[in-house]
Amino acid sequence: MDNQPDDELIHDLYATFGLAYYQSECLHRGLCIALTYLGLPPSDFLTGPRAEELLAQSFSLTLGEVAEKLDSILPAEWNTEIREAVERRNFLAHHFWFDRAHLMHNRDNVRRLIAELNAYADKFDKLDAQISEWPKLKEKQKQLGITDETLEDNLMKILAGEDEEPLPDKQTVRELERKLRKQQRLIRVWEPALEGGRRSLIFELADGTLWQLSDIGLGRTRFAEVGPGWKEHQKIKPYLPADIVPRPRSTTPWDYEFTLANGVAFWVKPGRRKRTFTWGLRIPS
């Protein structure tokens, strides 16, 4: 009876488990961010909604799934460590308490459990830092214009409680992926006026959803509904409605086509200036 753990020691055990699991979540998110950064096109070809879409796709993956996707991207010598981290995380999530419950009635055993959990937490933390400081990832951040100051500013906004629109959840991401791989009915192309006199193209599908052009075809837009004063694009209107594949096959950013009614091709190409694209209609002779 003298070797029974007291409440404080049990509290430390629970707290250390929380720390270990938290560090595994940090590693998970860090790997998701790495996968997103490394999969993004150059900043000249990138739009905000498209970056958010890719980040949401990465965050929808389990730790094991994102580790598998990075297997051939990260340095080969890290693969064993990452696989072990996945196994440890899964053990914590699904087996730790069941497998270790019989040890919680002895003070020395509880201390050993705390030491075990601290070792897990330390391993997750070091691996997360190792990936975050990987030169290839740092270089990609630099190419995308993501500076340490930008990250610090965003962290300060989060700590100050400034709300950001949440990313799509896992189910929404899965539905989006399925939707854009299938043929959809394009019924209108709108031309809303933006600040500074700029113009944009917003594509409306038969289900009422709105989309904008991205590096690989139609992508998410921040517009949820047709706004007042929007006008249909008169050059495109005669060739709608049309059945299109929102994400046509393409190997180059901003280089693809949609086939509209009467065989008319709506083509997209990179612009001559940075951060621009051009489009046009190719009408059969």
Image: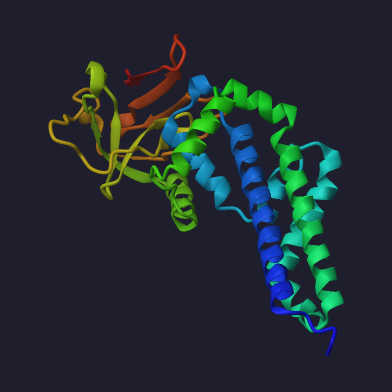
Residue in view at x 48 percent, y 37 percent: 156
Q: Position of residue 204 (x, y in %)?
A: 27, 40
Vertical position of residue 77 compared to residue 93: above or below: above
Report whether 273 appears left or right of 68: left
Question: Which residue occupies 81% across, 57% down?
Answer: 119
Quadrant containing the C terminus is top left
Q: Quadrant of residue 84?
A: bottom right
Residue 48 percent across, percent down from the top left: 43, 32
Foreground residue among 221 and 125: 125
Please state if 249 lies on the left or on the right of 105 as rendered: left
- Evaluate whether residue 225 shows in this view: yes
Name the quadrant of the N terminus. bottom right
Asked if 144 appears above or below 78 in the picture, the reply is above
Instruction: Give the farthest residue toward the left.
Output: 229
How many numbered marks have been drawn onto this rendered protein structure? 0
**In the current view of this chain or complex, which residue is farthest to the bottom?**
1
In the image: residue 41, left or right of residue 72: left
Query: Which residue is more in the foreground, 235 or 87?
Result: 87
Q: Given the current orientation, which residue lies at the most extreme front position?
A: 2
Residue 146 appearing in the image = no
**Where does residue 232 sit, x and y in percent of width and height?**
18, 30
Q: What is the x, y in percent for residue 157?
A: 44, 38
